[in-house]
Image: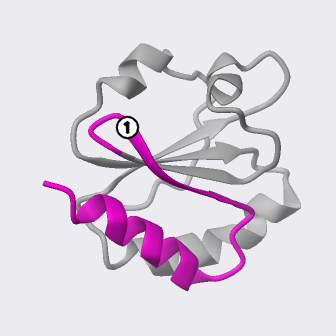
Amino acid sequence: MAMNTVYATTEPARAEIDALEGPVVIEFGTAWCGHCQAAQALLATAFAGYQRVRHIKIEDGRGRRLGRSFGVKLWPTLVFLSHGKEVARLVRPTDADMINRALAQIDAVP
């Protein structure tokens, strides 16, 4: 699967996220966030080596329950899941290597 480039404005229910199979990264942020924009090139570099990892971009903000259920306070926040369970988390990543390390953790889990 390729990296997702568009933030979804409709968020799935937490139960849907918890039921996901395989490796998944949820990215919380917004299109207008400078930190989120800066992270996109890093994410593209990191995701190039992890084709089986599903990437879900969720537009976050006031009143958004999914982000609150994950305790998101800063953007972008990347939550790395394996079979619906959080394995790693990065907040405002600054290099592709940190993203690669977290991706390797979820991609290695059967």
Q: Nearer the viewer, residue 31 or 13?
A: 13
Quarter occupied by residue 68: top right
In x, y percent, where is residue 49? 32, 79
Q: Nearer the viewer, residue 9 or 81?
A: 81
Q: Secondary structure at mark 1?
A: strand
90, above or below 55, in the image: below
**Residue in the picture at 75% in, 63% down:** 92
Dot 1: within a 10 Å radius of its alpha carbon, few (fewer than 14), some, or many (20 or more) residues? some
Q: Nearer the viewer, residue 78 or 4?
A: 78
Q: Is residue 34 left or right of residue 78?
A: right
In x, y percent, where is residue 50? 30, 70
Which amino acid, mark 1?
Lys
In x, y percent, where is residue 70? 62, 31
84, above or below 78, in the image: above
1, above or below 104, in the image: above
Q: Is residue 43 left or right of residue 72?
A: left
Q: Nearer the viewer, residue 42 or 8?
A: 42
Please state, as top left, top right, bottom left or bottom right, where the C terminus lies in the image: bottom left
In x, y percent, where is residue 18? 37, 25
Q: Which residue is mark 1?
A: 85
Q: Residue furthest left?
A: 110
Q: Is residue 32 left or right of residue 104?
A: right
**Residue in the picture at 49% in, 20% down:** 12
Quarter occupied by residue 5: bottom right
Specify the segment rendered in magenta.
Answer: 82-110
Instruction: Please say whether residue 85 is one of the residues in the magenta stretch.
Output: yes
**Residue in the picture at 72% in, 78% down:** 94
**Residue in the picture at 68% in, 36% down:** 59
Please state, as top left, top right, bottom left or bottom right, where the N terminus lies in the image: bottom left
36, above or below 45, in the image: above
Instruction: Please say whether residue 68 is one of the residues in the magenta stretch.
Output: no
